Image (cartoon, rainbow, N blue to C red):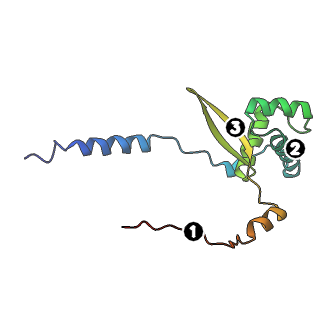
Amino acid sequence: MNWIGGGGGNVGLIKNSMLRYFSRQRAVNVRKINPKVPFPEAALISQSLYNIIKERGPLSIANTWNYAKEANISGLNSKTHMKIMLKWMRGRKMLKFFCNHVGSSKKFLHSTLPEEPRSDQSKVLSEPNLQTEKPSRKRKQK
């Protein structure tokens, strides 16, 4: 038996998976995105974008840009600047970015994170569910 050169099928699979894993690009660290404007101005722009996405539901980049133009957000210079701001907001956990598969194509959308339940809803959820009667169970006769 020649163990040096031959290797079984598992070695080839491991080699291919290692090659594929290490050849990928690293993900962008969205926490370190520079919004290209001073922080107070970035906070105002991000609040405006957040309100647009919250009102209109999950939006694509193109739709977000159209609504941002309609809203005349001050400080937002271009679509590229808006994309940078959206990345900055994702890094600050304000937005969620997800992919919708529509047939053979993909659609990437931004949405707001799910909010905490309101106080009136939490009271309803926290009340115990009391049963006054036990459900009757019939046993099978052997």
Under circle 3, the secondary element is strand
Q: Three-letter amino acid code at disc 3?
A: Leu
Q: Amino acid at mark 1?
A: Ser
Question: What's the CA distance linking mark 2 and mark 3?
Answer: 17 Å
Of residues 131 and 27, which is closer to you in this image? 131
Q: Which corner quadrant of the image does residue 8 belong to?
A: top left
Where residue 136 sits: x, y (%)? 57, 68
- Assess disc 3: are there few (<14), some (14-19) or many (≥20) residues with their C-alpha within 10 Å of its C-alpha: some
Mark drawn on residue 6: none
Q: Going from the N terminus, do you reach mark 1 or mark 3 first?
A: 3
Q: Is residue 44 above or below residue 118?
A: above
Q: Residue furthest left?
A: 1
- State which quarter of the image contains the C terminus: bottom left
Say few, some or many: other residues with alpha carbon within 10 Å of mark 1 (under 14 / 14 to 19 / 20 or more).
few
Q: Which residue is mark 2?
A: 48
Q: Position of residue 89 (x, y in %)?
A: 75, 48
